[in-house]
Image (cartoon, rainbow, N blue to C red):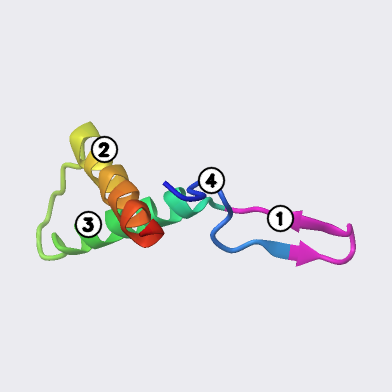
Amino acid sequence: MKNPDNPAYPVYDPEVMNWHRGLTKREYFAAMAMQGYLASYANKVHIIFNEADVKRCVEYADNLLKQLES
């Protein structure tokens, strides 16, 4: 993968003359996948989100990063 640990939205703070890294691209894409996954269950009363679901979201992020590098 190309630069999965680079920041998704770095912000420069002139007061301290330094960059705030925030989430990595991988973390950001995984969070967006998780948000979409949970939104697909919006009409359900009780959602069980387990470790396999979390791994699936990270795999989606990894696959997206892999596709973006080509």
Residue 30 placement (x, y as % from top left): 36, 51
Q: Where is residue 15 in the image (x, y as percent from the top left)?
A: 90, 63
Name, please, the residue furthest toward the front.
70
Q: Quadrant of residue 58?
A: top left
Pinpoint residue 51: horizontal percent, then vertical percent.
24, 33
Q: Please report the bounds of the magenta region as a residue range.
A: 12-22
Q: Which of marks 2 and 3 is nearer the N terminus?
A: 3
Say which quadrant the C terminus sits in.
Answer: bottom left
What amino acid type is highlighted by mark number 2?
Answer: Lys
Q: Which residue bears the numbered disc 2?
A: 55
Can you identify the residue that label 1 sits on?
A: 20
Q: Closer to us: mark 4 or mark 1?
A: 4
Q: Quadrant of residue 11?
A: bottom right
Tell whether label 3 touches label 1 (CB within 8 Å): no
Total tally of numbered discs in the picture = 4
Q: What residue type is labelled 1?
A: His
Q: Which residue is drawn at 65% across and 53% down?
A: 21
User: Which residue type does callout 4 highlight?
Assistant: Asp
Q: Name the residue under label 4.
A: 5
